[in-house]
Image (tube, grey):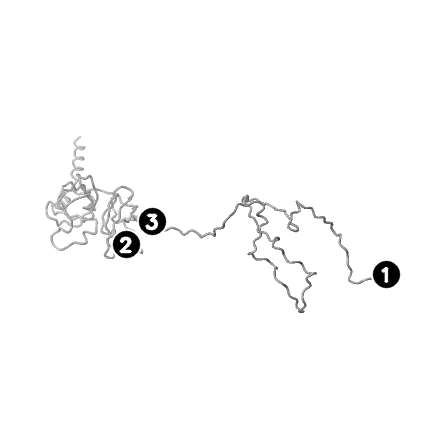
Amino acid sequence: MFGFNRFVNESAARTFKQTYRCYSVSMLPGQERQDVDKGGKIIMPPSALDQLTRLNIEYPMLFKLTNEKMNRETHCGVLEFVADEGRIYLPYWMMTNLLLEEGSLVHLENMSLPVATFAKFEPQSVDFLDISNPKAVLENNLRNFACLTTGDMLAIKYNEKIYEMRVLETKPGKAVTIIECDMNVDFAPPVGYQEPEVPKKVEEEHEQEDMSVDDIDFVDHSKFRAFSGSGNRLDGKRRNQDSECSDILPQDIRRGVPNYDYKKGKITFIRRSVANGKDKDTEAVDFSAFSGEGQTLKTKNSRR
């Protein structure tokens, strides 16, 4: 029983819990510290360092910041222990996430977080797409952070411009440490981004009339007629109009009608012959094979 109480007391003794008044980095006495404002680490008083070293806590030092009034929380690391007693200094984006004002009370507690394996970010502006290598820019900025919390809105500076990034997802937990880790990064489409519309192929619009049987014999005089020109002989003589075939009549030129009942994988044979502008089905044409008269090149003399 004595051993159990000793274990509980040692575990409680390793927990650091304090309440401080928080201020933005711009309120820090001395020269302006822009390096603090663009990272994810805070500045704490020297008394906190003295207490933390005696507690023998795990390193690196990670903390959970909680705004109990607004029920908001985030996680951070520590950069220095040079703040005035009873105060801590936070980056401006962190105070915005926690809905804190200058001089508000914030609860601070040391934490042990799992190592990050995956994180997904959502840019808050389409201007982020102008960056040629966003992953390299993000990796360079995350070196100033100690941990990530799902739901946080980070501020990243690149080319004298601030880009806001919302942390959509972190694995293996809601809050992870990114110190010396191999983490996969993914980006969601920026807020306000719209997929470019793919231009539709301009299709020729054909005016389709109600097709009937009579439309099969429709004649379009403006269409091209094959072999409709006049021929010339190489010897200069005029061709014999009687021996040549007559010109193609306009009514013999018919526009084809597509098979609207066509189905893929099905072949339809249309056997329909037309003679003199009329179907063979309506008018029979007498035909006898090999019924013509024969001719010889040399006439033979008849024997008497």
| Mark 2 → mark 1, Cα distance in angstroms | 111 Å
Q: Earlier in the sequence, mark 3 or mark 2?
A: 2
**Which residue bears the numbered disc 2?**
137
- Dot 3 amino acid type: Gln
Mark 1 is surrounded, within 10 Å at the Cα level, by few (under 14), some (14 to 19) or many (20 or more) other residues, namely few
Taking the image as shown, residue 75 lies to the left or right of residue 182, namely left
Mark 2 is surrounded, within 10 Å at the Cα level, by few (under 14), some (14 to 19) or many (20 or more) other residues, namely some
- Dot 1 amino acid type: Ser
Residue 47, quarter of the rendered image: top left
- Dot 2 amino acid type: Val
| Residue displayed at 75% across by 54% down | 292
Residue closest to the far top: 1
**Which residue bears the numbered disc 1?**
302
Identify the image quadrant of the C terminus: bottom right
Up-down: is 230 above or below 167?
Answer: below
Residue 303, quarter of the rendered image: bottom right
| Residue displayed at 17% across by 33% down | 5
**Which residue bears the numbered disc 3?**
194
| SS class, disc 2 | helix
Q: Earlier in the sequence, mark 1 or mark 3?
A: 3
* Residue 12 seen from this side: yes
| Mark 1 or 3: the one toward you | 1
Q: Which mark is residue 15?
A: none
- Residues 267 and 95: in front is 267
| SS class, disc 1 | loop
Taking the image as shown, residue 198 lies to the left or right of residue 25, namely right
| Mark 2 or 1: the one toward you | 1
| SS class, disc 3 | loop
Taking the image as shown, residue 35 lies to the left or right of residue 131, namely left
Q: Position of residue 60 (x, y in %)?
A: 21, 46
Up-down: is 38 above or below 242?
Answer: above
